[in-house]
Amino acid sequence: MASPETVASTDEFIKGLWRENPVFVQVLGMCPVLAVTNSGINALSMGLATTFVIVLSNTLVSTLRNFIPKEVRIATFILIIATFVTVVDYLIQAISLEIHRALGAFISLIVVNCLILGRAEAFASKNGVGPSVMDGLGMGIGFTFALLCLGGVREILGSGTLFGLALFPAGFQPWVVMILPSGGFFTLGILLLVFNRIKLRQDEKATPLREVTS
Amino acid sequence: MSDEALGTIFLNACLVNNFVLAYFLGICPFLGVSAKLETATRMGGAVCFVMLVSSVCAFGINQLLIAINAPYLQLISYIVVIASTVQLVEMFIKKISPALFRQLGIFLPLITTNCAILGLALFQTNKGYDFLQCIVYALGAGVGFTLALVLMAGIREKLELATVPQLVQGTAITLIIAGILSLSFMGFAGLGA
């Protein structure tokens, strides 16, 4: 038997993946979602960088939650986040200069990803360290998953490759629009549609007799 | 140092590489506040102002950071400056027009986390613009942001009169409109290049 506490933390972890997926359900952190998803590898590195920042900032915020005065909490959160983003920026530069160049200013822009500040404010500042880490991890992975969905679709259709591997025979005409900015809007719009559809289906299944009884 | 002409910088920031439709910066307020034309215009004005002030401050800070050789403080000091400017604008609007203050609601403090503003500060540093170029760049970006916001609000007001299937209502249809808008802005490519 799992203790109630582990059940709670697993739940914090899982909710970020699907039920409260940051991109598809909460529609948070849109800028990096659209901007860097023109290829799978960019999407993956962005997702991992964001996960790193969100887990660490959640940890620190929930550790310090009793020491931060309420009036200056947002400023404090932003400073904590900015510190970790600077760390990640230099880290990526050290690991792969190529990815750093591809993501450009968008690594620094993780600071203003509403998702991270949102989690710090809505979750980490009210909960203990354990659940906060799980929450950050879940949200981060859910975010990475959404980025990968978008990046995958856009790279397959826009360049005919996935993570740089050619998928189609030589005759394939890539849909250039998909790697252009507008492709990002279209893909995300359509993915949201699919997500809505699935959710509507589930709701219908859960309450099949609502029409009759009401 | 960059030696681009001022007009080119303005056109570039405003139309060719529109911050919202080409760089995807500031999508949150773009989707959030674009339901009504009036709010959109005023939001655009507030963002313009914050952009201008924080661009000037960022230029100064950057010179200082180069002088004391501490580039790793760049990000942290930029965000602090932006947060204080937003606070200033918030107090100003609350005093001048409480009605507008209520309309903008949560999106006013959220200008702090508007990527367009931090993005502007970072881009102008990367491009090595001088003082005058920075101001023109900030103006162009602000006007471009307002333009995108107002266009979007206009379309969405019209959309309220149309029948939209339940499935695509809300964010999905907004995103698809934004995609079409972004496509049409592609037509400006090559204008100032």
Image (cartoon, rainbow, N blue to C red):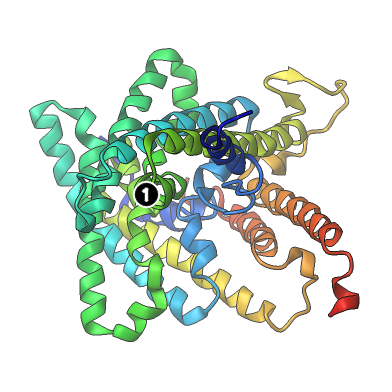
Residue B82 rendering spot, x and y as whole percentages: 25, 53
Residue name at image x 67 percent, y 80 percent: B160
The quarter of the picture where the C terminus of chain A appears is: bottom right
Determine whether, in the image, residue A127 is placed left or right of residue B21: left
Give the farthest residue toward the top: A95
Residue A99 rendering spot, x and y as whole percentages: 49, 22
Q: Nearer the viewer, residue A143 or A131?
A: A131
Q: Which quarter of the picture shows residue A17? A: top right
Give the farthest residue toward the left: B68
Q: Is residue B145 above or below residue A190?
A: below
Task: Give the amino acid type for the residue marked by disc 1 in the picture.
Answer: Lys
Determine whether, in the image, residue A73 is placed left or right of residue B193: left
Is residue A37 visible from the viewing direction of this image?
Answer: no
Task: Give the tally of numbered discs.
Answer: 1
Q: Which quarter of the picture shows residue A10? A: top right
Residue B133 rendering spot, x and y as whole percentages: 26, 50
Give the farthest residue toward the front: A1
Crowdedness of circle 1 by 10 Å Cα count: few (<14), some, many (20+)? some
Q: Nearer the viewer, residue B9 or B100?
A: B100
Residue name at image x 26 percent, y 62 percent: B86
Q: Nearer the viewer, residue B125 or B37?
A: B37
The quarter of the picture where the N terminus of chain A appears is: top right
Residue under label 1: A126
Determine whether, in the image, residue A166 is placed left or right of residue A146: right
Residue name at image x 44 percent, y 24 percent: A100
Q: Is residue A108 above or below residue B173?
A: above
Q: Is residue B142 above or below residue B90?
A: above
Chain under disc 1: A
The kind of secondary structure element at disc 1 is: loop
Residue A126 rendering spot, x and y as whole percentages: 37, 49
